[in-house]
Image (cartoon, grey):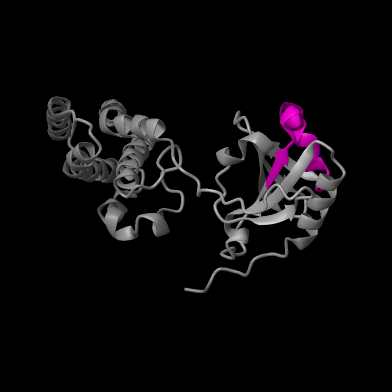
Amino acid sequence: MADPRPPRDIQPLLDRFVEVCSNDERIVAAFLGGSHARDEADGFSDVDLCVVAADDAFDKLVADREHLVGQLGEPLFVESFSLPNIVFFVLDDGTEGEIFFGSRARLAELEPGRHRVLFDPDAILDGVTFEEERSDPAEQNRVLREALVWFWHELGHFLAAIGRNELWWAAGQVEALRSHCLNLVRIDHRVWAGDEPYEKLDRTVGIDSVEPLVSTFVPIERDALWEAAARILSFHRERGPTVAAAHGETYPMELAELMTRRFDEARRTTGG
């Protein structure tokens, strides 16, 4: 397999970014994070930027984030997705990036890991080290509980869909079931889990951990969907109790047994 394409030249963007920061009195420092700062970028990497606002200017700067992006180029996409201190963008030259917002008094809340200072007239970043991005334990516990319990609700929807011969819906439920299993694997490997269970999966958990799920990517055909769901169900019942116990949660064994019986009966009676 060919190596990933080399990283694009982001220096023109960084130069514009520094110019914008130096002309905005609300910004007291700025730096580059992510794969570009770690010298791990390839041609598919986006650009992670961070601005540090004066404490009394933070809210106004965040509110003005779309204007900030507009000074970097012609944006075709600008969105925060309701996240309070970040903005995602795509410029018309193809540059994709994110800008994180922090304040001078709350530097410790930023988690870019390795970084490269771009703008720091008062040297407030001298000697500062940042943690790598950490997952919120409470959020990960929520995701784990959902993967353990909500999985069975999704299985019920699969049975309804395939019982009515609504195969597109059934295929969607296979995807939902698989996603819960992927989150179990991510949590088992101490990797952030959530709404994007496939993200960077190949290099964070290793494909051996999810190899049994490979065969669950199937055509939208009745027999194939039944078989995929059965394999996912087996994977969940095998891995779920171990992951639950390792993280202080209880696997819903009675629910699992009930829903497994329902699944087996439905498969027998509907010819799956």
Rendered view: 82 above or below 237? above
Question: Quick check: 100 left or right of 27?
Answer: left
Name the residue at 36% across, 43% down: 220
Residue 239 image position (x, y, % from top left): 20, 44
- Give the extent of the magenta segment: 50-73
Quadrant including the C terminus:
top left
Residue 56 magenta? yes
Name the residue at 17% across, 36% down: 271
Number of marks: 0
Residue 156 image position (x, y, % from top left): 26, 26
Q: Main secondary structure of the magenta part?
A: helix
Residue 73 image position (x, y, % from top left): 81, 48
Residue sitting nearer the eye, 253 or 167: 253
Residue 247 image position (x, y, % from top left): 25, 37
Name the residue at 43% across, 35% down: 136
Residue sitting nearer the eye, 42 or 103: 103
Name the residue at 74% across, 55% down: 118
* Residue 7 visible, this orientation: yes
Question: Quick check: 265 left or right of 127?
Answer: left
Residue 28 magenta? no
* Residue 44 visible, this orientation: no
Q: Residue furthest right?
A: 23
Residue sitting nearer the eye, 144 or 127: 127
Rendered view: 151 above or below 187? above
